[in-house]
């Protein structure tokens, strides 16, 4: 099984201008290499059989016949191959010359796609030789002894995907042909190009293609002419780019003097999910004024098991190193903006927040401090409450106090021990029985204290629970589950830890740096069970529900891509190779789905809180799921996973 992945390639052959036989040999060499690597579809540059820079030689009958004969040779070469190849050549038809992409497989030409937009400005003179594909509409052309459909409105259906083709300048048009092709059903767009180099042009092109891939919710595969093209006036660097919904999967080394084959896998499941849930895409389909499309089915080919060449990010919620500062600042800005609006709306200058010395309350406190600074409100309006209980350790207690002191907020300390012991006595609960009631009573006592202090100081309670805890239901219902504004509601645990570490190097004058770093290194725990004899945390969350980095990975692909458990398991096994065994991944994946379904009732009544990234569990926004939905199908698939 390939779990919805399609391996595609973009190839940059070395060419000789006007030497079709030589160019065909280079093309054949790259096709056989790609076939050996399990590539299903390979794309070559524009006019690669002749070379793009032939100039007035395109008017020569000999060149046109040599191009057709070379294509015949390529057809014969590929007769026994499953791979689909997209090759550029000039095609003569009814007194016109068309710049075409030939889609071939197993010795047959499946279709010819002519270039629509012919640049005729600055260094480009294509209208001197070629005619736009708009001229002829749908037609059939006799080429290489085959009657072949020719149209810019062609879609090709393979067992794995549906794809369309455009050529070079087409992508630069205000409304590219690929936009219409995508709305007609194309999931991958191939672009045969011969774009020359210029200062700054490459980055502009990458931005253009990334945006078109994202706008079309499609894969986009680009092959640009390279070494061997005439350098009389221009230089062609040989650009190979592969995108998936705006994300760059692979690119080559420009200005190489050697042929290049670049390949990756496009995730069709992800693209199809995006299109299903994106109502703007479906609305755009409904607005199509022209549906003059011709569907072409490719030959069936043997399914090939492939080992993914693309990397799978084990921490999809954490920004890359290049985007680190910008993304972290943006996350804080969103949280600060949300809280600032809430404070202005409620006309209060006081917030109450429970400070445990753990990650979540630390992040929430940092956001509160920065929000008060932005609003010009003294930080003393932040009431930080530490509430030592039966499981509080010296490490977390000290960190909580140190952090509050460093940030200059109002500090209150209220032990919950006496109140809980009285409550246990009222319930006739043995205090040595550390069951759910024992734990949840402490969480609810802390919440009651915070709510009552908020009434006392005319403030609001800031919730500290994060996205990962909401997904797993790792919160006490009407305890730490409840607040008046949940500032961390859409930030997963892995990102919380990352933000706290980032803040240690960024915020304030460095006074709180050591405390923040120690908090980031402290084991995650609700601290509801007494510490061990050495005052170490005895109740570690990740020992009970599993590693948060796994659960965040599962959560991302469940919410963002709606993947089924088997595919998430497959991706996790690739992303965490050498860190977790397949047995461990299966165990915690099963735990994730079991808890994710059973704990929905807590999410159905969660407090307000700002959406920060692409994933949220707010019942008023991204996630509206019945609390009594059955998890049977998901759990059954988890149980059926083979290790």
Image (tube, rainbow, N blue to C red):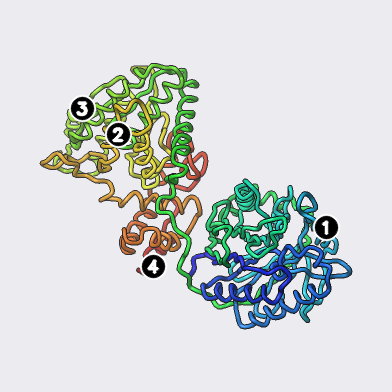
Q: Earlier in the sequence, mark 4 or mark 1?
A: 1
Marks 3,2: beta carbons within 8 A: no
What percent of the width, then of the height, locates residue 573? 38, 62
What percent of the width, then of the height, locates residue 388? 21, 30
Whole-number angstrom distance, CA of label 2 to CA of label 1: 64 Å
Residue 59, image quadrant: bottom right
Q: Quadrant of the C terminus?
A: bottom left
Instruction: Please identify, in this view, whether the residue under mark 1 or under mark 3 is nearer the observer.
Output: 1
Q: What label sits on residue 74 in the rendered view? A: none
User: Relative to 464, is 547 above or below?
Assistant: below
Mark 4 Cα shell of 10 Å, populated few (<14), some (14-19), many (≥20):
few
Q: What label sits on residue 415 in the rendered view? A: 3
Q: Nearer the viewer, residue 639 or 124?
A: 124
Kindly tell me whether residue 367 is visible in this rendering. yes
Q: Nearer the viewer, residue 34 or 434?
A: 34
Residue at figure coordinates x 25%, y 43% from the top left? 523
User: Relative to 285, is 151 above or below?
Assistant: below
Kindly tell me whether residue 8 is visible in this rendering. no
Instruction: Please identify, in this view, whether the residue under mark 4 or under mark 2 is nearer the observer.
Output: 2
Whole-number angstrom distance, CA of label 1 to CA of label 3: 82 Å
What percent of the width, then of the height, locates residue 405? 27, 23
Marks 2,1: beta carbons within 8 A: no
Q: Earlier in the sequence, mark 1 or mark 3?
A: 1
Q: Which residue lies under the disc numbered 2?
A: 516
Mark 3 Cα shell of 10 Å, populated few (<14), some (14-19), many (≥20):
some
Whole-number angstrom distance, CA of label 3 to CA of label 2: 23 Å
Label 3: element kind: loop
Check the image and name the residue furthest to the right. 95
Q: Which residue lies under the disc numbered 1?
A: 127
Instruction: Please identify, in this view, whether the residue under mark 3 or under mark 2 is nearer the observer.
Output: 2
Q: Which residue lies under the disc numbered 4?
A: 640
């Amino acid at each position: 099984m390939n779990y919805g992945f399609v391996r595609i390639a973009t190839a940059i052959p070395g060419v000789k201008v006007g030497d079709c036989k030589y160019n065909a040999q280079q093309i054949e060499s790259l096709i056989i290499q790609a076939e050996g690597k399990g590539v299903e579809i390979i794309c070559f540059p524009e006019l690669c059989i002749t070379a793009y820079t032939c100039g007035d030689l395109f008017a020569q009958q000999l060149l046109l016949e040599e191009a057709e004969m070379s294509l015949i040779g390529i057809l014969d070469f590929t007769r026994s191959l499953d791979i689909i190849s997209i090759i550029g050549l000039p095609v003569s038809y009814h007194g016109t010359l068309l710049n075409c992409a030939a889609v071939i497989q197993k010795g047959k030409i499946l279709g010819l796609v002519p270039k629509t937009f012919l640049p005729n400005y600055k260094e480009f003179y294509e209208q001197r030789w070629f005619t736009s594909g708009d001229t002829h509409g749908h037609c059939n052309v006799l080429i290489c002894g085959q009657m072949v459909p020719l149209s810019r409105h062609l879609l090709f259906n393979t067992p794995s995907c549906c794809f369309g083709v455009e050529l070079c300048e087409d992508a630069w048009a205000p409304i590219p042909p690929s936009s219409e092709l995508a709305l007609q059903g194309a999931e991958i767009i191939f672009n045969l190009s011969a774009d020359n180099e210029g200062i700054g042009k490459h980055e502009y092109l990458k931005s253009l293609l990334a945006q078109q891939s994202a706008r079309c919710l499609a894969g986009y595969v680009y092959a640009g002419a390279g070494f061997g093209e005439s350098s009389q006036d221009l230089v062609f660097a040989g650009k190979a780019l592969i995108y998936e919904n705006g994300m760059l999967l692979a690119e080559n080394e420009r200005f190489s003097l050697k042929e290049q084959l670049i390949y990756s896998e496009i995730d069709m499941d992800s693209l199809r999910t995006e299109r299903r849930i994106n109502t703007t895409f479906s609305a755009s389909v409904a607005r199509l004024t022209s549906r003059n499309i011709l569907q072409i089915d490719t030959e069936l080919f043997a399914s090939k098991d492939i080992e993914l060449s693309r990397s799978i990010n084990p921490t999809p919620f954490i920004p890359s190193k290049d985007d680190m500062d910008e993304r972290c600042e943006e996350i804080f800005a969103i949280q600060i903006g949300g809280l600032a609006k809430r404070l202005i709306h409620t006309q209060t200058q006081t917030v109450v927040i429970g400070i445990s010395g753990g990650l979540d309350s630390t992040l929430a406190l940092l956001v509160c401090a920065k929000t008060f600074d932005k609003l010009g409100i003294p930080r003393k309006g932040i009431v930080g409450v530490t509430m030592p209980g039966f499981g509080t350790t010296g490490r977390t207690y000290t960190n909580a106090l140190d952090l509050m002191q460093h940030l200059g907020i109002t500090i209150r300390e209220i032990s919950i021990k006496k109140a809980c012991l009285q409550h246990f006595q009222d319930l006739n609960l043995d205090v040595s029985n550390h069951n759910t009631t024992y734990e949840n009573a402490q969480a609810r006592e802390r919440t009651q204290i915070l709510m009552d202090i908020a009434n006392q100081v005319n403030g609001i309670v800031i919730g500290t629970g994060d996205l990962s805890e909401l997904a797993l239901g790792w919160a006490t219902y009407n305890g730490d589950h409840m607040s008046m504004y949940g500032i961390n509601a859409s930030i997963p645990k892995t990102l919380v830890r990352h933000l706290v570490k980032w803040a240690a190097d960024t915020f304030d004058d460095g006074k709180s740096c050591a405390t923040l770093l120690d908090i980031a290194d402290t084991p995650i725990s609700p601290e509801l069970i007494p510490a061990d004899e050495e005052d170490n945390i005895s109740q570690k969350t990740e020992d009970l529900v599993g590693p948060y980095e796994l659960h965040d990975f599962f959560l991302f692909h469940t919410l963002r891509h709606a993947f089924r458990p088997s595919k998430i398991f497959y991706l996790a096994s690739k992303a965490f190779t050498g860190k977790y065994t397949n047995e461990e991944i299966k165990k915690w994946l099963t735990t994730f789905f079991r808890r994710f379904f059973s704990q929905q009732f807590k999410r159905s009544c969660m407090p307000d809180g700002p959406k920060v990234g692409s994933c949220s569990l707010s019942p008023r926004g991204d996630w509206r799921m019945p609390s009594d939905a059955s998890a049977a199908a998901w759990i059954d698939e988890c149980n059926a996973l083979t290790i």
